[in-house]
Image (cartoon, coloured by chain):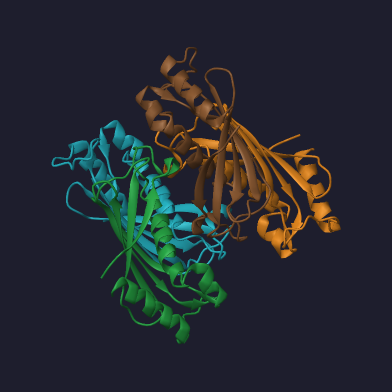
Chain colours: A brown, B cyan, C orange, D green
Amino acid sequence: MRYHETSLQVRFYEVDTYGVVWHGHYTGWFEVARNELTERFQMGPLQLKERNLLAPVVELSCQFKLPATVGDSLVIQTTMERTEVAKLIFHYRVLHQGDGKVLAIGSTTHVLTDLKGNLLYWVPPEVLERIEAMRKYLEV
Amino acid sequence: MRYHETSLQVRFYEVDTYGVVWHGHYTGWFEVARNELTERFQMGPLQLKERNLLAPVVELSCQFKLPATVGDSLVIQTTMERTEVAKLIFHYRVLHQGDGKVLAIGSTTHVLTDLKGNLLYWVPPEVLERIEAMRKYLEV
Amino acid sequence: MRYHETSLQVRFYEVDTYGVVWHGHYTGWFEVARNELTERFQMGPLQLKERNLLAPVVELSCQFKLPATVGDSLVIQTTMERTEVAKLIFHYRVLHQGDGKVLAIGSTTHVLTDLKGNLLYWVPPEVLERIEAMRKYLEV
Amino acid sequence: MRYHETSLQVRFYEVDTYGVVWHGHYTGWFEVARNELTERFQMGPLQLKERNLLAPVVELSCQFKLPATVGDSLVIQTTMERTEVAKLIFHYRVLHQGDGKVLAIGSTTHVLTDLKGNLLYWVPPEVLERIEAMRKYLEV
């Protein structure tokens, strides 16, 4: 298994009154990292929509280990889990770029649906191919 | 002229590392207050969209006088300016509920467009009536 | 067990390009609901800080069942779990006010630390009393 | 006069239900661009705080010309105005990286204060030097 890496810098407005990144912002970072990965394989939100597909988040979890603060340079590592059809599970690690310390780990679970939100019972072969290519890239 | 009033409580995540509300959040509050007002007159974003209309913000300004902080109870006062057709200008005042002190004043300018973003040259009479009703309510 | 209830209205800027609330905003709502509950028992973020205590989130999870959209009136139900000392676990349910449908469920885990982030080995009796009062109110 | 340039990519969560960047997010981008510029001259928020100084925003304005959407690559151009002592005025232009079209222009006005928010009547010479160096770099 390997990780796709995305670099980010903590923005001033992401830091709360205790001087650390407000925990809710990690969800946005996971999304930035996930979209960077999925877009490479034509599986980004806009690319899915062109095929009348959505991949809404149905589950989110995050563990916060160490705080991040203004100006910190971070790396978001993203990988995925091998799952049943029509379900995608991504795993994330947020690292401090300087010392490689893990600040947070998390995951999001997505389902593939049509534009009305109905779960797909049949996934188009070209979408399966892209998921397969993404898995190959991530060695999962 | 009179103001429509909207009550708000400062949320923890709206406060920055200096212990005061981050200035960018006032824009969201203006929107909450404006929508509460316009929805009363069937001119909210969703109600406009049902008529194939949009009212995008083309100009925004804000002056920050005094800081707000976590848990503060605020009042957003909203009124509008009498303008030419197809343009709406709203004015806002953010007050501390306790002592009535003015924390910020601002304004947003909106144009009426179709769903493709083309400026309306002709405003439907029922929309004009609603704008007129809103002006009457605000005494402008 | 009972829930403390907080009312919220979905803000326009919380809705994403798919017309539903962006999943990351639920974290902020959980916080609004949790702070409303904890402040009643002098255990809100500011009240803790006055006692040189923090209660950072160390774990977050959320399951998204049904979407919410602009203008929806929601109820956030909050309760807590009986846990070991120096740890607080809150559970949340997001309901549609009209029909009572559950849109999301989630939880956050917090630890009690001093202002430097060191875990408390000894919790001051008056803090224990407040936690106990909150548990009594929630019948847990 | 010249501009300092900052590159940004529109994040999915920054786009609203109309498929365009929600207008309130430009304020955050201005801040990202401004901090990148000021940090070069040891005038970023953290660097000022080390000298017991703050530079709060007292005025904000923005004109929105053309919409931006998910995945767009943008350039934020930042420059400043020559002003009286203890006041800083920054000007911004948001451009589409591909075709160079101007999407928005804006400005923020800041005052220099001590940590209690009192306006500085006397600006330390080393701060004046840094402002002067920033002006020289921006040719203003």
Would you say residue A117 is visible in this rendering? no
Whole-percent x, y for residue C38 in the image: 70, 50
Residue ranking furthest to the top: A122
Q: Is residue A82 left or right of residue D83?
A: right
Vertical comparison of D25 with A5: above or below: below
> Which residue is located at x 45 percent, y 19 percent?
A129
Residue B67 location in percent, x, y?
50, 67
| Quadrant of the frame with the C terminus of chain D | bottom left
| Residue in front for this viewpoint, A103 or A134 | A134
* Residue D87 in view of the camera: yes
* Figure check: B32 above or below B105: above
Q: Quadrant of residue C29?
A: top right
The residue most toward the left is B121
- Give residue C102's position: percent from left, percent from top: 59, 28
Q: Nearer the viewer, residue D38 or A99?
A: A99
Q: Quarter of the image holding residue B107?
A: bottom left
